[in-house]
Image: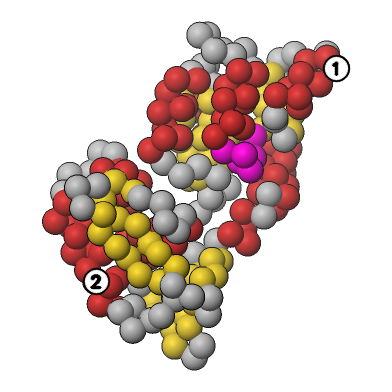
């Protein structure tokens, strides 16, 4: 399920956009300003961001510029009441991928978002290959040659996260927040159990290994 972040300071508009997105099969996160949005981005994988232009503290132009610095390929849809050509040009110059003017046509918004997701090839990234190993995000399977293992969702999400960023160290807190959710009461023991289960299941597979980084967390290492 794709995860969409809606950054909009008007509460009713934000709730409406999130509701429409949920009805169309997306998981949504709402942020009332740029600072909340950046905090969410630091803790949660997001597939696409919808950014309102006129917001207090930091406008959509500056937020888009900051997002583009850290997330080069993240699809960004800018939404604004401004309709002047120079406003659109400025939006594209700072890094937005598409532009919609208010009032928002809900069907058009969904079509634009789906087009952006296709264009950014995020859909194909939900099928991750590591040597002969293929992780299918939608089926929760890990396959190698003629062997297919279906994982529980938390285990799959954990493995997919680690293998998506080989050699990158993730702290225990980062992994617990992203896989189980910020509000979850999950502790280190649950994470350790899931890592050990993955190690047991794929111990004989030569393509990758999950390493413990003492005092920090975990990382996946590609070996083939």
Looking at the rendered structure, the secondary structure element under dot 1 is helix
Of mark 2 and mark 1, the one earlier in the sequence is 1
Residue 215 visible to the viewer: yes
Whole-number angstrom distance, CA of label 2 to CA of label 1: 55 Å
Query: Tag 2: Cα neighbours inside 10 Å, few (<14), some, or many (≥20)?
Result: few
Residue at image location 52% in from the left, 8% down from the top:
56
Given contact means CB atoms under 8 Å apart, are the residues at marks 2 and 1 in contact? no
Q: Is residue 92 positioned above or below 182 on the image?
A: above
Q: Position of residue 52 (x, y in %)?
A: 61, 21
Q: Is residue 99 positioned above or below 195 on the image?
A: above
Q: Position of residue 38 (x, y in %)?
A: 46, 27
Residue 105 visible to the viewer: no
List the residue tagged with mark 1: 85
Residue at image location 25% in from the left, 64% down from the top:
195
- The residue closer to the viewer here, 70 or 167, is 167
Query: Tag 1: Cα neighbours inside 10 Å, few (<14), some, or many (≥20)?
Result: few
- The residue closer to the viewer here, 175 or 98, is 175
Q: State which region is magenta.
A: 71-76
Q: Nearer the viewer, mark 2 or mark 1?
A: 2
- The residue closer to the viewer here, 9 or 93, is 93
List the residue tagged with mark 2: 197
124 to the left or right of 205: right
72 to the left or right of 34: right
Residue at image location 70% in from the left, 29% down from the top:
95
Looking at the rendered structure, the secondary structure element under dot 2 is helix
- In the picture as drawn, the residue positioned furthest to the top comes out as 56
Q: Position of residue 175 (x, y in %)?
A: 31, 49
Residue at image location 70% in from the left, 30% down from the top:
96
């Amino acid at each position: 399920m794709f995860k969409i972040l809606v950054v909009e300071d008007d509460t009713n508009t934000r709730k409406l956009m999130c509701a429409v997105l949920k009805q169309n099969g997306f998981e949504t996160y709402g942020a009332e300003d740029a600072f909340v949005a950046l905090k969410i981005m630091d803790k949660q994988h997001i597939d696409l961001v919808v950014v309102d232009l006129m917001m207090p503290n930091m406008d959509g132009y500056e937020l888009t510029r900051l997002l583009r610095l850290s997330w080069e390929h993240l699809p960004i849809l800018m939404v604004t009441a401004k309709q002047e050509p120079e406003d659109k040009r400025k939006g594209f110059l700072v890094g937005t991928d598409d532009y919609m003017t208010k009032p928002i046509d809900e069907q058009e918004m969904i079509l634009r978002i789906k087009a952006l997701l296709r264009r950014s090839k995020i859909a194909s990234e939900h099928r991750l290959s590591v040597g002969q190993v293929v992780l299918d995000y939608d089926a929760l399977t890990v396959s190698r040659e003629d062997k297919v293992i279906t994982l529980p969702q938390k285990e799959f999400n954990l493995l997919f996260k680690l293998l998506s960023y080989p050699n990158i160290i993730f702290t225990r807190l980062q992994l617990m927040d992203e896989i189980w959710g910020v509000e979850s009461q999950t502790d280190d023991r649950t994470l350790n159990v899931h890592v050990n289960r993955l190690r047991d299941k794929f111990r004989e597979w030569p393509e990758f290994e999950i390493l413990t980084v003492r005092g920090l967390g975990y990382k996946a290492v590609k070996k083939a």
